[in-house]
Every structure is written in structure tokens, then in C-alpha cells.
Image (cartoon, grey):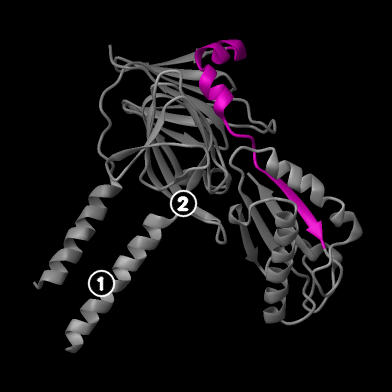
Amino acid sequence: MSTGMRKLCWGLAMLLSAGAANADEAIGTIKTLKGEVSVVRNGAPVTATAGMRLMAADKLVTGADSSVGIALQDATLMSLGAKSATQLNEFRYDPVKREGNMLISVIKGSMRFVTGLLGKQNPAAVGIRTPTATIGIRGTDFIVSVADKE
Amino acid sequence: MDAFSAWLLTVFVFFLLADEPAPLPPAGKETIVLLPDAEGKSTGIVVSSQGQEVAVTEPYQGIELAGGKVESKTFSAAQIKNMFPEVMQALPDQPRSFTLRFEQNGTRLTAESAAMVEEVRQEIVKRPAPEVTVIGHTDREGSDEANLRLSQNRAEAVRDILVAGGVSAQIIQVVGRGELEPEVMTADGVAEPRNRRVEISVR
């Protein structure tokens, strides 16, 4: 094998393993669940269950009379109400260095958000978006609600 | 440019694009309400919309966004409960922390800490879909390497007690931090009872 080829293979292997490690890492867990809740991962919806692990790019969708409660790795707590759609855009938390960042989008319906360690240690690294606003936090418990377009 | 560089570039551009999430589809009225801090500390959010930035610092104060307008509004606790019943009920309990302490040079809990293990176990089993992190620590007596091993052994000893009490080993994450994170800072080589401990977080 030529040196160039070998380097290329190493590069690929490292990139792939890094990608796999990130993709496999759970960023949170579903703690409470009522009614119909699904997790959309890689474009495919899966029926959610209590205890299910969540990944960084998951989208959570709830049906009528449904709700779900979630704890993220940094002890952020979230609950989502009925007929809601929430996208986890980014989540990274290093428990040893105590640093990372998160971005969550509330597409529709309601979400309650209680800041965890990330928000306490570095509030600027936490962002919540709605269709028309962004919310910055300062150590907090709050609700975001997006009504359906009439 | 060979195929590999082109692939790398594609991935890089994809990451750049992914950094800026696509705008969300338009929706109806948006309501954002600040709730009281559980520990009674000062709290706040800053909402940016339509080029305006509004700070909310009082509990039950909120912002309504509709038709390009940004309006401040004050709610009552009862109103919030009526408007958002599911999210008020579905929020998981706050994580709870415990500290267990050890006798010198080993994995034997102090009598006082051994008596606390049952309380930890109960906190775990009463929660839905529980998860536990056990982080072991040592004092600064002994070498860094030996202390790293000892801290790991202490965390594993506590895990084993919990597993013997019926907790699934799969939900317990065990970490040893050696003498790196003393509760009380001492000079190196000092035996300090408060630093011989595991910290347990139940969520």
C-alpha cells in the first residue's frame, strides 16, 4: 500500500470512528411519557417509550392528550405538551471539563425548560429558538409556546 | 483535487451549513413565560425577535409575539397551570445528590455513610427510568496513580452495594477521579476524611 493510500485509509477510519462515537452517544433520557410520543431520528419516526435514550439530532413529536418529560446529560429538564414538535439541534456536554453547548428549537406546541449545569456554568452556550424568536437564558425555568398558524 | 479532499470539503461545507439551522416554518402566536427559580434565586431570560431584545426578570412575566408585534404580559400561577397543564405535570424531578464517605486506605464506608445507602437506593427505585452516576474520590495521601485506582474501586464498591440491593448495573455509570477534585483543598500527602468520598447523582 502506498504511503498516500495508507494515510487516506487512516484519515477515513478516524473520521468514521469519530462520527460513530458522536452518533452513538446518548444525550438524555425520556423519563415520563403520556399518550403518543415519537422520536424522529435520521428522518424515520420511532414510537418513544419511558427510559428511551435520546441522540443529539432527534426531533420529538407528541400527539393529542400527550406529553413527555426529559432529562438531558447536564441535568437540564424539559417537558413537552400535546401536539408539539421540538428539534434538538445541538447538544454537547463534557462532564469532566464542564463545558459544551446546546440549541433547541420549538417548532410548535409548548415546552417547559429548566436549566441544567450547562446553563448555570455558561448561560451563553444555551439557546432556544422559536419560529420568530431566540431566547437567551440566565439560570432559569420557563415555558415556550407556539400556537398553530390559523 | 483527489476524491478524498472533495469528500472532506463536502463534509466541511455540510458542517458549516449545519451550524446555521434552517429557519423554522411560520406559526401562530408565540408565548414565552418565565417561571420562579426552584431555589428562589434570581432568574431571567432575554427574548430577541424582530430586531428587538426584551429582558424578562420577574416570575410569571411573559412575552407574546404575534403579527410582528412584541408585547409584555404578566400572568398568574393559576393561569399558567390552566394554559399549560401537560408541561407543568410532565417535568421530571430535579436530580438528587448524595455524598458517602470512606475509612482510610480502602473501600469501607464509614458507619454513618453505610447507614445512608438505603436512602440512596430508595431514591433510585422510586424514580421512573432512573439513571445514576457514581464518582469516586480520594484524599491526597499516596501517589496519583494509586489514588486514581482507589477512587475507581470506591465507586465500584458503591455500585456493587446498590446492585446487591436490586438496582440494575446498566443504569449506573461509574467514574474515578483520584485526588483531582478534593472537597477540601489540602497539601499533597495529607489524609483528609472529607476528601475520601463518592458523589452519587440520581436522576
Residue at 69%, 79% in the rendered image? B144
Using the numbered discs, state the Cα–Cα distance from disc 2 to disc 1 in whole angstroms: 24 Å
The numbered mark at residue A26 is: 2
Residue B198: image location, x then y, percent: 74, 60
Q: Secondary structure at mark 2?
A: loop
Q: Is residue B35 left or right of residue B4?
A: right
Q: Amino acid at mark 1?
A: Leu
The image quarter containing residue A37 is: top left
Same-chain status of marks 2 and 1 = yes
Residue range of the region highlighted in magenta in the rendering: B76-101
Chain designation of label 1:
A
Q: Is residue B119 left or right of residue B48?
A: right
Q: Nearer the viewer, residue B121 or A134?
A: B121
Let me know if residue B57 appears in the view: no
Residue at 58%, 55% in the rendered image? B170
Residue at mark 1: A12
